[in-house]
Amino acid sequence: MWDNIMVFLPLLLKGAVVTLQVTALAVLLSTLLGLLWALLQLSRWPAVRSATRWAVNVLRSLPIVILLFYFYFVMPDLGINLSAFTAGVIGLGLAYSAYQAENFRSGIEAVDRGQREAAQSIGMKEGLILRRVVLPQAFKIALPPYGNTFTMILKDSSLVSTITVAEMTHAGQLIASSTYQNMTVYTLVALLYVAMGLPLLYGVGRLEKRFAHR
């Protein structure tokens, strides 16, 4: 069994690198889009608010696998060819942008309105108020659910294996199908996910304590 582990582990670690790349890029995309969705949901124009909420609800109701299939299998029919890796990042990032939007929206709405009014009273423009007053506090409020979403993206990055992205789960499937060492392979995959997820949870917890102390 030990010999098998030493053979399988380097292959799984290569897949783990791809998993971390997909996760990092999907988190970045979901964060940027989620912040945009959140700001549009708080727009002064009712039509913009309604359209954005409708779009966010549609994204939240779609299975992630369907989004992945759409970007990888359907987009070529429209003349847009994406690599499996790119389609995986876009599909995963777009799916989770809807959840990030709710994290940021609730954080922004939780900031005391009196602080915005105080900033306006000293002549600060709306954009500056958003950057200097609202968003820093909103991020601290949204950090716990943001950390949970980060962890969920890491776990759901395994779904990109359905469109042949050579991440860790896909590597495990290939090894298991050729060696029939299912217990050894999938136990290693599970342990590697834990090894990636626990430091992430610890880091988010440390940030929460630091912000609470401040």
Image (tube, rainbow, N blue to C red):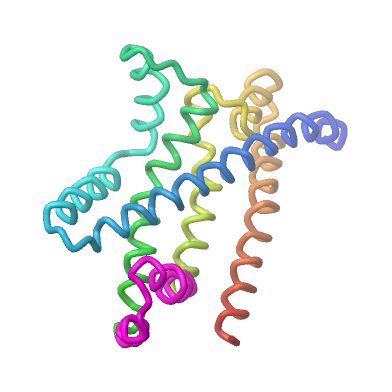
**Residue under the point 52% across and 55% down:** 150
The residue range painted magenta reads 114-140
State the predominant SS element of the stretch in magenta. helix
Asked where in the image residue 39 lies, by quadrant, the reply is: bottom left
Q: Nearer the viewer, residue 47 or 140?
A: 47
Residue 86, given in percent of the width and then of the height, sits at 51, 28
Q: Nearer the viewer, residue 132 or 142?
A: 132
Q: Is residue 161 above or below residue 141?
A: above
Q: Is residue 131 magenta?
A: yes
Q: Is residue 164 above or below residue 26?
A: above
Q: Is residue 173 left or right of residue 51?
A: right
Residue 201, given in percent of the width and then of the height, sits at 61, 64
Q: Nearer the viewer, residue 2 or 152?
A: 152
Q: Is residue 29 above or below residue 125?
A: above
Q: Residue furthest front?
A: 123
Q: Nearer the viewer, residue 141 or 32?
A: 32
**Residue under the point 35% across and 25% down:** 70
Residue 126, given in percent of the width and then of the height, sits at 33, 69
Q: Is residue 195 magenta?
A: no
**Residue under the point 67% across and 42% down:** 187
Q: Is residue 166 left or right of residue 11?
A: left
Residue 151, given in percent of the width and then of the height, sits at 54, 55
Q: Is residue 184 above or below residue 175?
A: below
In which quadrant will I find the C terminus?
A: bottom right
**Residue under the point 68% across and 60% down:** 199
Q: Is residue 30 left or right of residue 181?
A: left
